[in-house]
Image: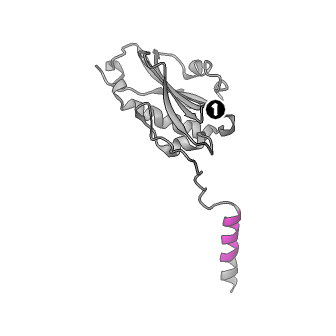
Amino acid sequence: MKYAKTVAAVVLALLASGCAQPKEEKRAFQVPDSLCGTPVAPELLSPLLPAGGDKLEVKRRHPGMKGALSCDIVVDGTTDLGVDWEWREIGTSPGRIARENPYVKHDTYASEDGRSVHAERGGVIRVDCEPVAEHRKGEMELFASVMVSNEGRSDADAVKNLLTAYAKALSTSSECERK
């Protein structure tokens, strides 16, 4: 009997503490699995997108631009999230690029290796294109950034997770290959 009471108390404590799986948000739209051709897991995008809405579009900004790409997720006519990649001079710090992003408070969270900075609504990361000495841009490095326009979806951990996965996907893309 004593054992049963202990087990019941533990089960109740776990339930009360919210250890159950979080509910997936119900949306009328499907969360995409790529952004302008770069694969991104929907579960990484989901926490940064509105909980509701009817129509989601992925739109490329500045389609004719060379050496850079910008892509927005637009829900019901409002831009909620943007991702970018661009080539910058070797030695450019992610913090310098982040200062150009209105959604990143300067170096809120910086990685120990200096490769990335992020905050609740955005971040910048240097993409590893290997081998560095042979990639097609010579004296340039590839950087990726994330911007969350929707204030209600601020989440530093979700930004970091998306930013890291997006950079990893870019590192295996044709943009990193020598041409």
Measured from the top left, where is residue 156 in percent x and y? 63, 37
The residue under the point 36% across, 22% down is 132
Compared with residue 29, is residue 87 higher up or lower down, i.e. above or below?
A: above
Residue situated in front as seen by the camera: 51 or 110: 51
Q: Residue at x 68, y 34 (%)?
A: 151
Q: Is residue 78 above or below residue 1?
A: above
State the residue at coordinates (58%, 42%): 54
Q: Which residues are magenta?
A: 7-16
Q: Position of residue 16 (x, y in %)?
A: 71, 64
Tag count: 1
Q: Nearer the viewer, residue 170 or 110?
A: 170
Does residue 144 show up? no
Report crowding for label 1: few under 14, some 14 to 19, many 20 or more residues within 10 A (C-alpha).
many
Quarter holding residue 107: top right
**Residue 13: in magenta span:** yes
Q: Report the amino acid beneath label 1.
A: Arg
Q: Residue at x 57, y 48 (%)?
A: 27
- Residue 138 seen by the camera: yes
Decide whether the magenta segment is chiefly helix, strand or loop: helix
Residue under pointer 1 = 121
The image position of residue 48, as x and y in percent, is: 59, 39
- The quarter of the picture where the N terminus appears is bottom right
Which residue ends up furthest to the left in the rendered image? Answer: 179
Q: Is residue 172 above or below residue 95?
A: below
Q: Quadrant of the C terminus?
A: top left
Q: Nearer the viewer, residue 51 or 94?
A: 51
